[in-house]
Amino acid sequence: MDVATARESRSSSSERLGLLLELSHGFIAQRDFDELLPLVVQRTKAVLGAEGCSLLLVDEEAHELYFPVTSSAKAGIDQSLRSLRFPVAQGIAGQVVRTRQPLLVNEVSENRYFNPAVDRQTGEVTRSMLCAPLRTRDSVIGVIEVINSLEGPFEETDLDFLEALALSVALAVETSMLMGSLRDTTTRLAGEVSGLRRERIHADSFPEIIGQSPAMESVFALMESATNASIAVQIQGETGVGKELVARAIHNYGDRKAAPLVALNCGAMPASLLESELFGFARGAFTGADREKPGLFEAADGGTLFLDEINAMPLDQQAKLLRVIQEGEIRRLGETVPRKIDVRLISASNADLLQEVKEKRFREDLYYRLNVFPIPVPPLRERAGDIPLLASGILGRIAEKAGKKIRAIDADVLEALIQYDWPGNVRELENELERALALATPGASISVDSLSPRIVERFRSNSGSDPGVIHRRGSLREARQEFERGFLVSILQLHSGNATRAAKELGISRQMLQKKIKDWDLRSVGVG
């Protein structure tokens, strides 16, 4: 833009007042500030006949100024400015924030507050500047600055106009911040309500799977997404974590629940029989085939086929499985005519399938066909907070099946179960509780005396005392409450009252921990 054009763009006092009025109406009407503030910056640049105009806001935590809204004449400058931050203690803009007073500088390079680092990083050359503070009742939240007049030096009337405009801009920015804070609070509360609702949905949708830890919440969320889809699901996890239980829940609460779910453990099936078991055979297909037999794919037609320990399937059978997935049809042994099938495939592996692929024990093309929707199930040691619920649920089920009444689980038993690593996962926990139930006196509670020596020894080494001398009595509810309070105190003390770190170790949200601290009156622990 040449000087003559710039002079024409220099607005009259009435035009400036008109702009202030127009923008004030926009602020009062609380227009979308994400649209309004860029308009303010663009119009201000034009009214003052300048190369650029920017809004800088103060980051209170970092004590820095940053550029959320900019309008520059040169290409690339805006993008560079929006990536910049500099300390409030530096620059002309920083001086305006500190003094709360506007500044007019027509020879920027000679000003003692000038920070040339911004020009070096953007490629801009700042010659002159107007800068006005964005004042609120209690502080300065930023500045609005205009640089490089295109029609001679900036004048005091220009600064008066910018200062007047800054009053409305400050009000708009403060309102936007308050609205943003309100939106954040609303979003957070909505998220917490949604989380509680999800927990309730999970409890209702998959009652046979017990868990409230964040790790299991992730599993539940994936299961919900998988229930009504027909894509292949790959469940990953160590032996004993309950992969088949997850597969059955996905089937039982999905669109195919009226059709059968057929399960096969590939690791338990001899390789020589696996093909005929999966695909079936015709009469006379081999010695002893005196009748035809449909395979598991046909048995699961319209429903779900669950292949556990898929990593144990021989490579030649993997090739045949891949063909079935690709073509949607099977051929019985001894037949030449294919049969169309409609089967949802859910597989599970207790090994890292990708590592199996790298070591040439599993076909890469089959891996990508099976691993469309992976669901990792965490080991029990990574969700120790679920153990009291699991123990209670499992014990109730097996006690009812055995016809034996048990009053409760002692609190020190629950603590011992939580401290153990459970290499066999939920399956090992169930076996341990079956053993404890067999040893327990009918009508009494499960005590430490009923636990396996390996668990007692681990508990003794961790606690530094002999748990065998502890024989608390009471209901399971009382035991759990007693244990939970003591356990929370110990974790909070371990982290010097830091609720964030304690919540992370406990596997719960900080909000949930704060609620428990309030419920148990643990403020004396020094929570921060």
Image (cartoon, rainbow, N blue to C red):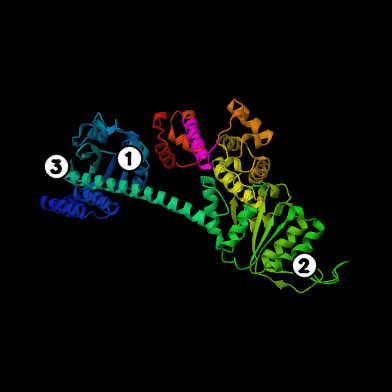
| Foreground pick, 338 / 259 | 259
Q: Nearer the viewer, mark 1 or mark 2?
A: 2
Question: Which amino acid lies under the numbered mark 2 shown in the image of this protein?
Answer: Gly
Q: Which residues are magenta?
A: 473-492
Residue sitting at x 27%, y 48%: 176
Q: Earlier in the sequence, mark 1 or mark 2?
A: 1
* Residue 185 location (% of width, % of height): 34, 47
Mark 3 and mark 2: span between their CA atoms? 90 Å
SS at badge 2: strand
* Residue that mark 3 sits on: 160
Question: Which amino acid lies under the numbered mark 3 shown in the image of this protein?
Answer: Asp
| Position above or below: 487 against 182 | above
Question: Left or right of 522: which side holds 352?
Answer: right
Crowding near pointer 3: few (<14 within 10 Å), some, many (20+)? some
Crowding near pointer 1: few (<14 within 10 Å), some, many (20+)? many
Decide whether residue 310 is among the magenta residues: no
Decide whether residue 487 is among the magenta residues: yes
How many marks can you see? 3
Q: Nearer the viewer, mark 3 or mark 2?
A: 2
| Foreground pick, 310 / 455 | 455
Circles 3 and 2: CB distance less than 8 Å? no
* Residue 175 location (% of width, % of height): 25, 47
